[in-house]
Amino acid sequence: MQTGRAARIALYLYGALAIAFLYLPLVSVGFASISKARYLSFPIKRYTTQWYGKALESHTVNDLLWTSLTIAGIVTVVSMVVGFFGALAFARYHWRFRGVFQKLILLPIFFPQAVLGLALLMWFNFVGWIPDWKSAVVAHLVWISPIATLVIAIRAYSFDPALEEAARDLGASTWTILREVTGPLLMPGVVSAGLFAFLLSWGNFPLSLFTTGADSTLPEWLYAKMVSGYSPLVPTVGILSIATSLVLLIIAYGISRLLRSGRDRRQQADG
Amino acid sequence: MERHDRTMGLLSALPVLLVLLLSFAAPLLVVLAFSVMPPKVFDLAHMPDFSAYGVLLSQGYHRSLAWALGTALASTILLFLICWPLAYAMAKVFKRFTLVITVAVVITLFVSENIRLFGWVLTLMKGGLIEGHLRALTGMSFEGALYNVPIIIFGLVYVYFPFMLFPLVQGISMVPDDARQAASDLGASKWQVFWEIDLPLSAPGIVVGSLLSFVLAAGAMAESKLLGGQAVIVIADEIETAFTYGQNWPLGSALSIVLILIIGSLAVFGVSRVDLDSIMGRGR
């Protein structure tokens, strides 16, 4: 069934409109971050980059950056490992409780994060752990490790179990198979899961809000400033945080392109 | 081989199950236990009573619950209507553009939700991007579009857009083109194809998308706080207030349990009807 020409054009326009809708608020934040006036009002009359200088000099902002980076870094590594095995249980192996397991994994994703954060706060209090950035790592993992599992599971579905069986028939141990066959095959999924984990942890607000104790992450600080009145540093730090994510995405994309072209070249040389 | 699969499956499920047990199941049990404690205690060494649930019934908390569920329902319906044409186009019409939209939407997911909502405040407020430029260009002015119920629903639609869009795309791409072609060859109108073929065959995607958006929107509070300026108080907000300003953990826990029961039963019901293997990879 063919879609008519007019309908196709309308759909393309609709798609472009949807992207514009998603990015319009970020455009406003961008303009606000380079407005000279202390109290923002559009249209902007004088532009300046002084707020970026101020933000980068500020000790508070540097501390926030480090806290957010540390949390996201640990969450990334742990969810890659946990998600790798979780995905095998999700998609690859046929075991008795697989159906239940698949559904269990989804529950934290379907859960209101602010309530989850509060529940964790009470749990930490119950076991006598005074919350700091380390407890935020745990909070992020509850939500992010299932997502990492799903991302890797998509890759694990397209994986031919015969490859593992062949390796076993040739006498490879379970550990060798995981390291030499399963691992490399799932690696693209593991890398994108790591990227997802980092970025989701970096931007997370509702889970951090109740679980960082005296420490604070970037999104938390931004929120506190937003509700207490306008500060020109809010859009500036917001843009800096977005820029960090973008740089990371571009680096990841570049690396994956390099790896792929390297592999293609090797295959050409072999063939 | 069979036995090997069985033990390996269980073993590889263990790490993520351990994470969920220690930091999902256990906290929920603590919340449940706190919800039956007497008011304003901070440990569990008290005789259980159900006074927190009594307060919950007598203090009009049903209103904030209704606001949360109502705005969530409205935004879910709007999201379905807005996302369907786009999801259809991404699954069946666009070629390279599908990738462009996917990447563009995923990138917004990585920007903290409160930065994006703050962006809408700057866009819609009086003296904001829209009103400010309109005034400068035409001299017309309006009182900003913030701090009311429709803008809260707008915020929910904005934030949960990807959670409806991607499951719908996945669902619609499961509809075989042959079935649509056959129906239309046999004389079905466009509307009939939509109603009798597209809708039922993409049901798994619709269920997952609607469920995700409804559940997440029902537990959200940033939208009502930042955009709605507390025009209405939603349940998640009440829960936070009970824990922080109210210093009443049992009340906050009882409120959480009510929200968790509503959301949890919906999620379990929906998820149990969906075959994840076919959505995520196998069987296509």
Image (cartoon, rainbow, N blue to C red):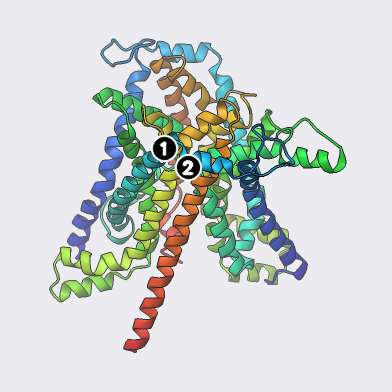
User: Which structural element holds mark 2?
Assistant: helix
Q: Nearer the viewer, residue A258 or B3?
A: A258
Q: Do the dots labelled 1 and 2 sit on one chain?
A: yes
For image coordinates 29% across by 26% down, the residue present is A130
* Precedes in sequence: disc 1 or disc 2: 2
Q: Where is residue B90, by image quadrant?
A: bottom right
Per the model, the C-alpha gap separating discs 1 and 2 is: 11 Å
For image coordinates 43% across by 40% down, the residue present is B268
Q: Nearer the viewer, residue A253 or A29?
A: A29
Q: Where is residue A262, by image quadrant?
A: bottom left
Above or below, A252 relative to B241 = below
The quadrant in which the N terminus of chain A is found is: bottom right
Front of the two marks 1 and 2:
2
Above or below, B52 relative to B88 = above
The quadrant in which the C terminus of chain A is found is: bottom left
Q: Amino acid at mark 1?
A: Leu
Residue A69 at x, y = what percent? 38, 45
Residue B185 at x, y = what percent? 69, 72
Which residue was labeled with disc 1?
A64
Q: Provide the chain ID for the residue under circle 2.
A: A
Above or below, A250 relative to A126 = below
Would residue A248 appear left or right of A35 to someone viewing this image? Answer: left
Q: Could you tell me if residue A38 is visible in this image?
A: yes
User: Which structural element holds mark 1?
Assistant: helix
Q: Amino acid at mark 2?
A: Leu
Q: Where is residue A258, by image quadrant?
A: bottom left
Q: Provide the chain ID for the residue under circle 1.
A: A
Which residue was labeled with disc 2?
A56
For image coordinates 75% across by 70% down, the residue present is A5
